[in-house]
């Protein structure tokens, strides 16, 4: 039935170190019909802390505690459901492009109740100097001078590597490694090549 919400949302996940360009690629694909880009970072930054779920986040922050994975996933679900209610995201014909979630295997397991992950795109940028250059340029462009120091950048990269190694292995059966050192248009081309040959995408797109 047209407009009927599926039990699980179909999704492609973009995963990569800071500076690899996953946000850029997510925005590019999100501009194409039948894809909907969702940035968890943007959702966090726009959070209304006056809401009950916002107050839950504040309570952990005030105590200096990490936000539980369950709360993060619950916030994701409320955000994406709200977009579906507003018809910004049309789950019967759109595929989610997830950027910034999941960040751990535990989050991935909790998300399984809500989404069907068709493919993990691991945007690989083994040239650490290139990553550092990209992150520094972005920090300076956004006016975040403190984030432009090499010490801060190296820490962010190490944190990412420590957090996501198991996550990459978790999706090993549906992982596509993409060389993110290339020009953005070539990265987009490689991502679309994988998507267009994906059997689930071919079945899904045939319903349009």
Image: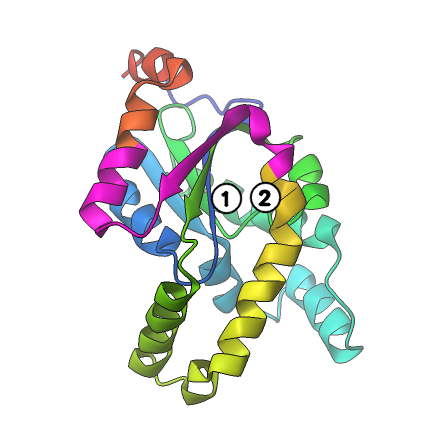
**Percent position of residue 130, x then y:** 35, 65
Question: What SS does tag 2 mark?
Answer: helix
> In which quadrant is the N terminus drawn?
top left
Work out whether residue 176 can be spotted.
Answer: yes
Magenta part of the chain: 169-191
Figure quadrant of residue 191: top left
Figure quadrant of residue 37: top left
In the image, is 88 to the left or to the right of 76?
A: left
Q: Looking at the image, what colour scheme do you see?
A: rainbow
Q: In this view, does 114 lie above or below 73?
A: above
**Percent position of residue 63, x then y:** 80, 77
**Residue at 30% in and 17% down:** 205
User: Dot 1: within a 10 Å radius of its alpha carbon, few (fewer than 14), some, or many (20 or more) residues?
Assistant: some
**Residue at 35% in and 24% down:** 93
> In which quadrant is the C terminus drawn?
top left
**Residue at 51% in and 53% down:** 100
Disc 1 + disc 2, Cβ < 8 Å: yes
User: Dot 2: within a 10 Å radius of its alpha carbon, few (fewer than 14), some, or many (20 or more) residues?
Assistant: some
**Residue at 26% in and 49% down:** 182
Figure quadrant of residue 86: top left
Q: Name the residue under label 2.
A: 77
| Residue 185 within the magenta-colored segment of the rendering | yes
Q: Is residue 98 above or below residue 92?
A: below
Work out whether residue 31 can be spotted.
Answer: no
**Percent position of residue 181, x then y:** 31, 52
Q: Mark 1 points at which residue?
A: 80
**Percent position of residue 84, x then y:** 44, 38
């Amino acid at each position: 039935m047209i407009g009927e919400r599926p039990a699980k949302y179909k999704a492609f996940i973009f995963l990569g170190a800071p500076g690899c360009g996953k946000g850029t690629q997510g925005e590019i694909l999100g501009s194409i019909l039948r894809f909907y880009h969702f940035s968890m970072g943007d959702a966090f930054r726009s959070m209304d802390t006056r809401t009950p779920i916002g107050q839950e986040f504040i309570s952990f922050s005030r105590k200096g505690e990490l936000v539980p994975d369950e709360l993060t996933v619950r916030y994701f679900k409320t955000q994406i459901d709200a977009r579906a209610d507003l018809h910004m995201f049309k789950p019967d014909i759109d595929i989610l492009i997830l950027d910034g979630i999941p960040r751990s295997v535990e989050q991935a397991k909790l998300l399984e109740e809500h989404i069907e992950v068709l493919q993990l795109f691991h945007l690989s940028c083994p040239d650490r100097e290139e990553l550092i250059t990209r992150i520094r340029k972005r920090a300076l462009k956004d006016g975040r001078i403190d984030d432009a120091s090499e010490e801060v950048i190296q820490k962010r990269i190490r944190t990412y590597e420590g957090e996501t190694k198991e996550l990459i292995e978790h999706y090993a059966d549906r992982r596509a490694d993409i060389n993110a050192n290339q020009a953005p248009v070539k990265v987009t081309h490689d991502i679309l090549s994988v998507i267009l040959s994906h059997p689930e995408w071919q079945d899904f797109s045939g319903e349009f």
